[in-house]
Amino acid sequence: MAVRIRLARHGAKKKPFYRIVAADSENPRDGRYLENLGTYDPLYDPARVSLKSDRIQYWMDQGALPSDTVRSILKKEGFFADKASSAA
């Protein structure tokens, strides 16, 4: 089972709201997931993001790969910058 950290779309038509989830890569986009890791709301300027950094780090340590979009969100939120400075 390959685990991916990706977005699951929720919200109404024309009003998207996303959950950042850890899910089996073979499950549908909005289907079953293993754990809710945060939220992403693109309707605000700037977009509202809430993350459970400790759980995201746990899943990445277990081998989960973030999707391109989630990787971009994490980078904007400084998730990888924190890890690079602590590793040095």
Image (cartoon, helix red, strand yellow):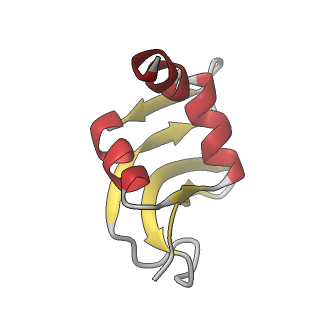
Residue 41 visible in the snapshot: yes
Residue farthest along the front direction in this orientation: 88
Residue 7 in the image, given as x and y percentages of width and height? 56, 56
Height in image: 22 above or below 37? below
Instruction: Report the front residue among 62 and 77.
Output: 62
Instruction: Report the front residue among 57 and 52.
Output: 57
Residue drawn where x is 40% and y is 18% of the image: 86
Residue 19 in the image, given as x and y percentages of width and height? 46, 52
Residue 45 in the image, given as x and y percentages of width and height? 65, 18
Height in image: 61 above or below 63? above
Instruction: Report the front residue among 34 and 1.
Output: 1
Residue drawn where x is 55% and y is 76% of the image: 25
Residue 42 visible in the snapshot: no
Height in image: 51 above or below 30? above
Residue 55 in the image, given as x and y percentages of width and height? 30, 46
| Quarter of the image with the N terminus in it | bottom left
Residue drawn where x is 40% and y is 78% of the image: 32
Is residue 26 toward the left or the right of residue 31 in the image? right
How many marks the image carries: the answer is 0
Residue drawn where x is 39% and y is 35% of the image: 51
